[in-house]
Amino acid sequence: MSVNKVILLGRLGQDPEIKYTAGGSPVCNFSLATTEAWTDKQGAKQEKTEWHRVVVWGKLAELCNQYLAKGRQAFLEGRLQTRSWDDKDGNKRYTTEILASTVQFIGGPSANTGDRAQAPGGQTVDTSYAQAAPAQEYQIASDASFAADDIPF
């Protein structure tokens, strides 16, 4: 038995970026910072920030792109995924990222509205907890609409 599960609570380091595959599937990328603080043996406060690359697919990708922004907090669950590609010079490149299956938007534009937002057509959307459809395996390298230079990180 094995488990590949990631749970993070952090702040976005940039506005989300959304792209669409040739088949029309939305994919959203953003970076999330988590910070650990402690006091060392000399009594000095220490802090370390870790940056995480996050990938979200489907309707959840569109919601993240619409409601998240740089500096906003997000709580997410997903799994680690490492993928590789050849850069323009023919070198093998690797990246490890979190493939998010659920994202909870923390905070928001106004404290009274919580995470309820107005969608086009006047429909109210609860953005506090969004979940992706079951993840489907997808290989960016095999999608002709993505070139290695298109990878946003």
Image: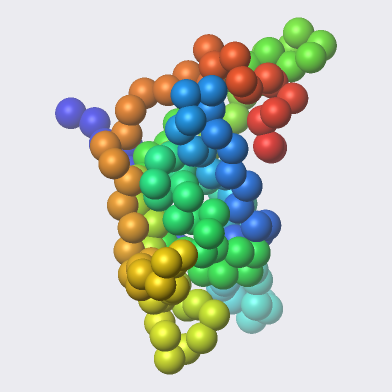
Q: Is residue 138 above or below residue 96?
A: above
Residue 92 pos. (x, y %): 68, 13
In the rendered image, residue 102, in percent from the top left (x then y), is placed at 34, 52
Q: Is residue 26 left or right of residue 45?
A: left
On-image quarter of the C terminus = top right
Quadrant of the image containing the N terminus: top left
Comparing 61 with 87, the one in front is 61
Q: Is residue 140 left or right of residue 129?
A: right
In percent of the image, x 35 and y 72: which residue is there? 124
Residue lying farthest to the front in this orientation = 121
Is residue 48 visible to the viewer in this orientation of the structure? Answer: no
**Colour theme:** rainbow
In this view of the protein, can residue 37 be seen by the observer?
yes
Query: As displayed, is residue 148 above or below residue 126?
Result: above
Q: Is residue 43 left or right of residue 119?
A: right
Query: Residue drawn 62% across and 47% down?
Result: 17
